[in-house]
Image (spheres, coloured by chain):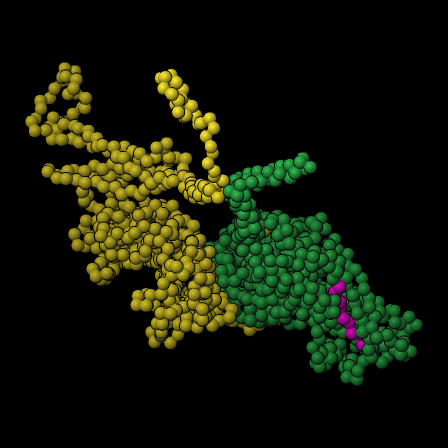
Chain colours: A yellow, B green
């Protein structure tokens, strides 16, 4: 803004006092919740949910006044007559085989499905405009949603909220699997939270940690719900959910222990003053089953038991609104330690940075006898920048060999020898224990053929077709315009003269 | 000549003929860019447009206002025209067209009432006056309608009252008074200059002069309550009631200018971008005038863009400073605290700092319940809204009684003034847009001009001309509508995406694709043509030699 002008004199407008409105009971409420689940594979899943409920009928009021409900989304509901909106942006894939069933799974990329009110006449037009606006709000490429990737499911995707008619004509569904989710999608999502990222659970939402994970899924769900038990009127519910799966091995140097600070690089310091409920649940099911294999610190005041997704679960509950939880140490850093180390292993993984450093994966494994261990790494074939291709790109690119360093138990116990006197070939590697010896093995280098583009294909095609056309045309032209007539041999051609020369040399009469 | 040679020659000629007669036109036609014809001459004519803004004034004489013989020889109309000097290519002339008549019976009766307000309500009842027109009543010199020291009265509607005089030169004196009043109530030079601020050269209206909001079809008004410290302050504001009681009436009065939508929101943990300074003398915090521009940008990211419409947004922020920084005052350039504790930024909106009563902290523990005095806040916001729209404080001529606005906070003639300014601004914008579009299309020859773009251009030109005509004949409302149409059509033409289709198609690539085909085909044709030409010339020369 270029200029700001202080408002100096104001005696022009004198408004008469109106009737004083007494403070009404608040019509909106906020609940926030974080569930931390140690996964069977050793990873840790964290699921945030922020629920804003607003007892207002957005569709009928001309002037809208927002408190906790974000204005940007409220305007969308009233302008496009939405009944339900579900948007999720996901990076990675929830691996049910290793991680167990998720609370709410979402497909990789962006998914949007919307139920419109049955007053909407041109659903496709509203859908197009809505996806464009959502793409602006969440900085995602939702504007690529068009008729070619939109479907209207007839059996699935029934409304999740209050609905009196389910005419699937008012449903639109689209998925953009290519969408890459990153910080610029998280920032607008965080801005919709009433406490922004200043207080409460949202303090933990630090972008550089949330995207350093194996799975990241953020979602917005808007739906109408019943305001009371008899469902006489409608309220709007906005649920913002965020699930992440932390790779505990990478962040925890091979240990499965975790703490809030280690995962999010933040701790909880104060509850959001606007929230009516603010809780952290930690899954300690294995603790109650396997006789105290893990320890949660600080010890929870209450626990909660329920059957979730078909299994009985136990959660340690921390209520941030309870003064005792935070006030003891001024912040809350929930820590979980496994008492018995589950296996003697070590994994160190250093991911590559493009054009700067390669991947490094080190594993310390104890191999049982007569066993086969397979280490497989998935990789993606990518196109390099065109200047980075070698002169013979079709030859392929080399991946350096992997190394196995092992202490192999010896069949025969060797007697301890003096270093200086033993032959040189037997004393390269120092051996501390005589019952085993050291070997280092290398595998073959790997030759990977990467896709190579054809750098000049389009122009070649143009030139080739033009040449073919020109050649055809040229011969036609010659055929039609040239005149052909038989020429009487006067002195004869070059061949005849040569033949006569040879004939004369041989003494044969010329032709 | 052998017949084979003739046949070959004829074939070559046919080839050349087919290539020229058929090939060239097909190639030309298929690669041509479609350019619909545009009214270039009319667009360049718009540049030198002469705007005549007519203000129809009805002057009504009561019985004893002027000497009788003067009343006898009243002319029907008098035109008073003057040029408004602006450094702008568009010439703007303002003409006051005064139509004289004697008062009708019911008007005489109304003007003989006790107070001027009473007279006005009785007069206003029969018919609503058209936008832009004025009615001036000339009353007798000794009438008790006005206080004795006042010579004229300006009402909230489109009426004014001027005291008459019994004098030989009565007619001229009253004429001068009428013009004085009419100029205060209708368009003046600075109103138009502010409206044309974007189009005038910088030296005349530098950027620190206040610039009113750009003309648009509609506006969105957002009231935001910023509470950076919800742990200490639990703020409640009755914004719904305030909008209903104060904002809506004002916007209804302004409804001729555009559509308005109003909403409000509360933002928590939203802080200003500037750390206020501590003033130990008064143990308060202050924001210096030079730091005010830096306040807005960080806040703006939290305000949220208005996703649902394309209209410009006006933001009004009520900032309740956090406990650690209160009380907070805004200082002006001289270092004195601003009485209203508010400031505004042209074309963006206004910010008011609302300090919590320090007594509240003693009574109870945190958070303190704060109920905003919404009347005080709305007074500031409505005044800022007037300033943002460029509704200046009226300049009252000397010895004039001034009524002040009615409950809605806007006088009818202020609305007229705004409509005039907006019409002129719209016309200037539309003309500039059309001129630059015409220039651009003339300069770059491979821009496609589709039919719908052309029709928008024609529509815009027609609307500009219609608006100018309506202004000249004094129909302000329809002129304003036409000027809005002109802007909408011209911008729709200018920003049509089809104009960009072929813009970035360079010539060298075109030739790289043409040459492999065209060169091998053209060379034999040209060579054989040259050969035929040489041979025919030789055969023409031969007969001459034999002669």
Residue at the right extreme?
B168
Please give the name of the residue rendered at 42% of the width and 23% of the height, measured from the top-left corner: A497
Q: Where, quadrant-wise, is the C terminus of chain B in this rendering?
A: top right
Please give the name of the residue rendered at 79% of the width and 60% of the height, measured from the top-left corner: B83
Picture coordinates of residue B474 (x, y %)?
73, 69
Q: Quadrant of residue A251?
A: top left
Taking the magenta stretch, the answer to whether it contains residue B146 is no
Q: Which portion, as a residue range, is magenta?
A: B52-60
Q: Quadrant of residue A406?
A: top left
Picture coordinates of residue A125 (x, y %)?
45, 65
Residue at the left extreme?
A412
Please give the name of the residue rendered at 58% of the width and 67% of the height, measured from the top-left corner: B259
* Of residues A118 and B306, the one drawn nearer to the viewer in this rendering: A118
Residue at the top extreme?
A421
Picture coordinates of residue B461 (x, y %)?
66, 62
Q: Where, quadrant-wise, is the N terminus of chain B in this rendering?
A: top right
* Of residues B377 and A112, the one drawn nearer to the viewer in this rendering: A112
Residue A18 at least partly seen: yes
Please give the name of the residue rendered at 44% of the width and 62% of the height, measured from the top-left corner: A128
* Of residues B267 and A359, the one drawn nearer to the viewer in this rendering: A359
* Of residues B536 and A344, the one drawn nearer to the viewer in this rendering: B536
In the displayed structure, does residue A24 sit left or right of residue B261? left
Picture coordinates of residue B347 (x, y %)?
61, 57
The overriding secondary structure of the stretch rendered in magenta is strand
In the displayed structure, does residue A57 sit left or right of residue A311? right
Q: Quadrant of residue B531?
A: top right
Number of numbered discs: 0
């Amino acid at each position: 803004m270029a200029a700001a002008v202080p408002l100096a004199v104001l005696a022009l407008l004198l408004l008469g006092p109106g009737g004083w409105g007494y403070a009404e009971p608040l019509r909106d409420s906020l609940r926030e919740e974080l569930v931390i689940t140690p996964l069977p594979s050793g990873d840790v899943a964290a699921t945030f949910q922020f629920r804003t409920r607003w007892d207002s009928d957005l569709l009928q009021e001309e002037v809208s006044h927002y408190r906790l409900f974000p204005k940007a989304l409220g305007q969308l509901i009233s302008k496009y007559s939405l009944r339900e909106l579900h948007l999720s942006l996901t990076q990675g894939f929830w691996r049910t085989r290793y991680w167990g069933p998720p609370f709410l799974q979402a497909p990789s990329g962006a998914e949007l499905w919307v139920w419109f009110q049955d007053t909407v006449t041109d659903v496709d037009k509203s859908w197009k405009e809505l996806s464009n606006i959502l793409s602006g709000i969440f900085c995602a490429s939702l504007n690529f949603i068009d008729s070619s990737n939109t479907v209207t499911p007839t059996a699935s995707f029934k409304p999740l909220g209050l609905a009196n008619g389910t005419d699937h004509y008012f449903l639109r569904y689209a998925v953009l699997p290519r969408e890459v989710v990153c910080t610029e999608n998280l920032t607008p999502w965080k801005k919709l939270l009433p406490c922004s990222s200043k207080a409460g659970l949202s303090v933990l939402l630090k972008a550089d940690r949330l995207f350093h994970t194996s799975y990241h899924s953020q979602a917005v769900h808007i739906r109408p719900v019943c305001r009371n038990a008899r469902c006489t009127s409608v309220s709007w519910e906005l649920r913002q959910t965020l699930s992440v799966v932390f790779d505990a091995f990478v962040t925890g140097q091979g240990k499965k222990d975790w703490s809030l600070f280690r995962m999010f690089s933040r701790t909880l310091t104060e509850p959001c003053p606007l929230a009516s409920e603010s809780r952290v649940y930690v899954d300690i099911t294995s603790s109650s089953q396997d006789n105290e294999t893990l320890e949660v610190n600080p010890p929870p005041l209450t626990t909660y038991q329920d059957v979730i997704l078909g299994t009985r679960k136990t959660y340690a509950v921390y209520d941030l609104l309870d003064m005792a939880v935070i006030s003891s140490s001024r912040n809350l850093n929930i820590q979980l330690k496994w008492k018995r180390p589950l296996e003697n292993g070590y994994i160190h993984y250093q991911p590559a940075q493009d054009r700067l450093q390669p991947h490094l994966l080190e594993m310390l494994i104890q191999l049982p006898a007569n066993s086969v261990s397979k280490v497989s790494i998935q990789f993606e074939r990518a196109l390099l920048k065109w200047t980075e291709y070698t002169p013979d790109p079709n030859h392929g690119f080399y991946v350096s060999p992997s190394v196995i360093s092992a202490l192999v138990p010896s069949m025969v116990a060797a007697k301890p020898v003096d270093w200086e006197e033993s032959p040189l070939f037997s004393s390269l590697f120092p051996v501390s224990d005589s019952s085993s010896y050291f070997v280092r093995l290398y595998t073959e280098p790997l030759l990977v053929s990467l896709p190579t583009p054809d750098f000049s294909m389009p122009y070649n095609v143009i030139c080739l077709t033009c040449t073919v056309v020109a050649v055809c045309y040229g011969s036609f032209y010659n055929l039609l315009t040239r005149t052909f007539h038989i020429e009487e041999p006067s002195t004869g051609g070059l061949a005849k003269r040569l033949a006569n020369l040879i004939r004369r040399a041989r003494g044969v009469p010329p032709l | 000549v052998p017949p084979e040679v003739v046949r070959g020659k004829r074939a070559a000629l046919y080839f050349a003929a087919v290539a020229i007669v058929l090939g060239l036109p097909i190639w030309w036609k298929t690669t041509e860019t479609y350019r619909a014809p545009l009214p270039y001459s009319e667009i360049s004519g718009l540049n030198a447009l002469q705007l005549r803004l007519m203000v129809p004034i009805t002057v009504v004489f009561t019985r004893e206002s002027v000497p009788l013989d003067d009343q006898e020889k009243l002319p029907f109309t008098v035109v008073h025209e003057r040029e408004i000097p602006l450094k702008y290519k568009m010439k703007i002339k303002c003409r006051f067209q005064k139509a004289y008549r004697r008062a009708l019976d019911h008007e005489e009766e109304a003007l003989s009432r006790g107070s001027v307000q009473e007279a006005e309500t009785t007069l206003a009842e029969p018919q609503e006056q058209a936008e832009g027109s004025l009615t001036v009543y000339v009353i007798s010199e000794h009438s008790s309608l006005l206080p004795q020291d006042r010579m004229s009265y300006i009402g909230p509607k489109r009426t004014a009252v001027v005291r008459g005089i019994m004098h030989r030169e009565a007619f001229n004196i009253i004429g001068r008074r009428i013009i004085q009043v009419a100029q205060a109530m209708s368009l003046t030079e600075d109103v138009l200059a502010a409206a044309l601020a974007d189009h005038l050269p910088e030296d005349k209206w530098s950027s620190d002069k206040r610039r009113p909001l750009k003309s648009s079809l509609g506006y969105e008004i957002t009231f935001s309550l910023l509470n950076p410290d919800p742990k200490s302050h639990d703020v409640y504001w009755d914004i719904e009631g305030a909008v209903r009681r104060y904002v809506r009436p004002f916007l209804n009065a302004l409804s001729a200018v555009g559509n308005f939508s109003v909403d409000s929101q509360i933002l928590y943990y939203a802080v200003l971008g500037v750390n206020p300074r501590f003033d130990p003398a008064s143990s308060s915090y202050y924001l210096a005038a030079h730091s005010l521009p830096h306040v807005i940008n960080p806040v703006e990211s939290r305000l949220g863009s208005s996703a649902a419409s394309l209209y410009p947004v006006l933001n009004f922020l009520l900032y309740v400073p956090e406990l650690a920084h209160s009380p907070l005052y805004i200082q002006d350039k001289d270092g004195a605290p601003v009485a209203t504790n508010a400031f505004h930024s042209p074309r963006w909106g206004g910010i008011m700092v609302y300090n919590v009563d320090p007594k509240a902290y003693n009574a109870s523990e945190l958070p303190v319940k704060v109920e905003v005095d919404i009347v005080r806040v709305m007074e500031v916001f409505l005044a800022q809204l007037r300033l943002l729209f460029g509704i200046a404080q009226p300049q009252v001529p000397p010895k004039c009684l001034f009524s002040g606005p009615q409950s809605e906070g806007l006088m009818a003639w202020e609305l007229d003034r705004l409509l005039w300014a907006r019409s002129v601004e719209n016309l200037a914008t539309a003309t500039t847009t059309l001129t630059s579009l015409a220039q651009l299309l003339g300069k770059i020859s491979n821009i496609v001009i589709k039919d719908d773009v052309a029709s928008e251009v024609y529509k815009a030109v027609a609307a500009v001309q219609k608006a100018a005509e309506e202004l000249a004949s004094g129909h302000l409302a329809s002129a304003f509508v036409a000027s809005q149409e002109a802007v909408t059509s011209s911008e729709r033409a200018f920003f049509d995406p089809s104009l960009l289709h072929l813009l970035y198609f360079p010539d060298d690539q075109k030739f790289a694709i043409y040459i492999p085909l065209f060169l091998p085909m053209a060379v034999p044709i040209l060579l054989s043509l040259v050969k035929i030409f040489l041979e025919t010339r030789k055969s023409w020369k031969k007969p001459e030699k034999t002669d």
